[in-house]
Amino acid sequence: MKFIIALAFLAAVALAAPQGDKKPIEIVSSNSEMNADGSYSFDFESADGTKVSESGSQKQVGPKPEDIGTVSKGSYSYTSPDGVVITVNWTADENGFQATGDHLPTPPPMPEHVVKMLADLKAAGVL
């Protein structure tokens, strides 16, 4: 899970990294906090409007006391080349990495016959 968090952070940093003859983009604000209990938070904003925010804490994820994992949530946003602000909100926990954003694709609605079949199965006590 830490790998996913690090990957998301590196992706955001890569978007702000200098490319070719472009000048470096100034960081206009940056905050970070690390606590003794393992919780943390950080955020930064660059001059081009890119914003990154993340927070996390330790959570019991299994039956043993040593089964501790990091649960994180955050967001990042940037302006696409066509001028649209892209925002991604995400959570990384025992259910995996889950991202949401208006620009992300969504599955098509379930066909009517599948909805009916699932309702029939539930009514019959199979589900």
Image (spheres, rainbow, N blue to C red):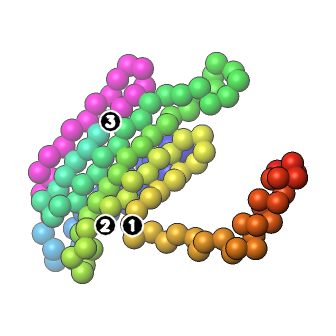
- Kindly indicate the quadrant of the structure image that contains residue 56: top left
Compared to residue 20, the image places residue 68 above or below, namely above
Q: Secondary structure at mark 1?
A: loop
Report if the CB atoms under discs 3 and 1 are less than 8 Å apart.
Answer: no
Is residue 69 visible in the rendered image? The answer is yes
Viewer-side label of 3, 1: 1
Q: Amino acid at mark 2?
A: Ile
Residue 76: percent from the left, percent from the top? 32, 55
State the residue position of label 3.
41
Between disc 3 and disc 1, whose residue precedes? 3
Residue 17: percent from the left, percent from the top? 25, 64
State the residue position of label 2.
86
The quarter in which the N terminus is drawn is top right
Report if the CB atoms under discs 1 and 2 are less than 8 Å apart.
Answer: no
For disc 2, the neighbor class at 10 Å (few under 14, some 14 to 19, many from 20) is some
State the residue position of label 1.
102
Residue occupying the point 67% across, 28% down:
62
In the image, 88: left or right of 118? left
Between disc 3 and disc 2, whose residue precedes? 3
Q: Secondary structure at mark 2?
A: strand
Q: Secondary structure at mark 3?
A: strand
Q: Which residues are magenta?
A: 24-41
